[in-house]
Image (tube, helix red, strand yellow):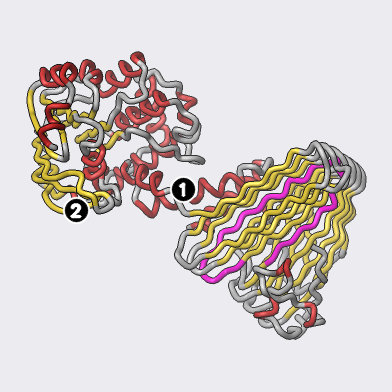
Amino acid sequence: MLKIENLQVEVGGKPILKGLTLDLPSGEVHAVMGPNGAGKSTLAYALAGRAGYEVTAGTATYDGQDLLALDPSERAAKGVFLSFQYPLEIPGVPGLTFVRTALNAQRKARGESEVSAPEFLKLVREKAKALRMDFDMLKRPLNVGFSGGEKKRMEILQMAVLEPRLLILDETDSGLDIDALRVVAEGVNALRSPDRAMLVITHYQRLLDYIKPDKVHVLAAGRIADTGGPELALELEKSGYDKYVGEAA
Amino acid sequence: MMAARVNLADATTFPSRRVEEWKYTDLHRILRETPPSSPEATVAPGGPFAALGGEELAFVNGRATGATQIVVEGETTVRLRFVSTTEGTGHEAACRIELKPGARLLLLESYEGQAPRYVSNVVLDITLGDHARLDRIVLTDEPDSAISLARADVRLGRKADLVQTTLTNGARLLRQEIHVAHPGAAFAHIDGLYVLDGKRHADLTSTVTHSGVDGITSQLTKGVVKDEARGVFQGQIVVREGADGTDARMGHHALILSDRGEVDAKPELEIYADDVACAHGNTVGSLDQNALFYMRSRGIPEAQARAMLTEAFLAEVTDRIGREDLRDLCRAWLVERLG
């Protein structure tokens, strides 16, 4: 579903990703782990199309199309979803309005009809309940004054409503206590399916106890330094990233 | 700000930017001579507030079609219209408004331009008796070639409430001024909203002078400028000696959405009393790029994301309007101007 080849990305003129290659087939969940500064968030932002993350070489192909040529909103309409490490606060725009606008914008871009207000409310109520979210929270401006855990639940709720096909989770476990982590992970696991793929970006192994990856990639100094099964994550938890950092230096 | 008043009949009263209070709104630069006098004219009843009912009092090309004053006992709604209908001419209008003690007035004031290049100068003299309440909505809809000046002098009685919101999309040069004599133990809520494009100019200037104890002033002005437009906010709150316990808050926040747009802000607090709670905040910036990217990453196209963020930013002002029908009308005005 997603094929990244020799991806090189600069931020502010500084090379961060230096030839990253990764193949994520449909139906699989891959973890990308690595030390701070390895380029994990840069990978996430480059795939989502953030300005300032300049691709200087390489390709990213999604369902056979050049992902990097698309505008961020077009990527979203085609099913790419980035769950932010630090979701933004949007003052003055209620969560419900935001999610409905996003859903209908995506549907419009795909040539589908808009979802009516009653249909939408029914859908959101259902998804919010599954995530044990207070529905009234959705009437408040999106993420404004929310705790870290509440913001992450909002991310998962948006994911559940928008039903993306390629999910990129950037440090979804940061700022979560163990109960919130469990709820968020359940929400993510509920979206696992043969026609979806997930890229789970994380510093710690903890999240992978709840979201079981098919493969684990180690990102160090802008490249994939190692790839293995779930056992690789456990190994990293014990021995740390020193080995890879040393190699890169 | 006791600068001489503009008198259209006397070109020496047209202030230039050398007059401190008119530093950002240079009338003299674009108006050097007395314009020809506007002829008599008539307009059909209506205006932007027609759906809200009330009595209509219209000044057409400066001439009152009925009374030139509004005196209120009890409770009433008045639609006060200042309509300019003739190209290239000038006129002045003056209206006196008096609220007797305990009276309530909903004043729906509109500035309507039906021809290009006119000059309009409006002076309002407003008195609120003790315990009176004035709700005032000012809405302007004038061409980008017009000059529109308006000045309101307001005297508040004890425990009186002045609650006003001004919404404007400017003109070639537009200035809405209000000067409030605040006796203390009264409430002044003076909000403003400007949405400017092209080469439009809007100036919202206010002074509030607190001369007694326990007065409250709350001001929030927000605006956006696009293209080569220019927004001006001048807000002055003076707390005189002895006006202890005054609570005065003033905020002005603007977005500049183009390279050549300009916003000039001059918030001033002058405090000569003790034990007061006064604060002012002023920010001028652009849309939050991080928020924009977040919205786009969820599938909202850039133009739509910008419009949503801008509307949400400005709606903080219309959300403060208490009456639902008025709030909806003002929100609709805002959405239309942003569209």
Using a 10 Å C-alpha cutoff, classify the residue at mark 1 as few (fewer than 14 neighbours), some (14 to 19) or many (20 or more): many
Give the magenta-colored segment's residue range: B175-201
Dominant SS in magenta: strand
Q: Is residue B244 highlighted in magenta?
A: no
**Left or right: B203 in relation to A66:** right
Task: Look at label 1 and name its amino acid.
Answer: Leu
Q: Is residue A60 visible?
A: no
**Left or right: B168 in relation to A32:** right
Q: Which residue is mark 1?
A: B309
Q: Is residue B200 highlighted in magenta?
A: yes
Q: Which residue is mark 2?
A: A69
Q: Secondary structure at mark 1?
A: helix
Mark count = 2
- Which sits in the foreground, B280 or B175? B280
Q: Residue B187's x, y, as percent? A: 79, 42
**Left or right: B62 in relation to A84:** right
Q: Residue A52's x, y, as percent? A: 29, 51
Q: Residue B185's x, y, as percent? A: 85, 39
Q: Secondary structure at mark 2?
A: helix
Residue in the picture at 23% in, 17% down: A210
Residue in the picture at 53% in, 47% down: B313
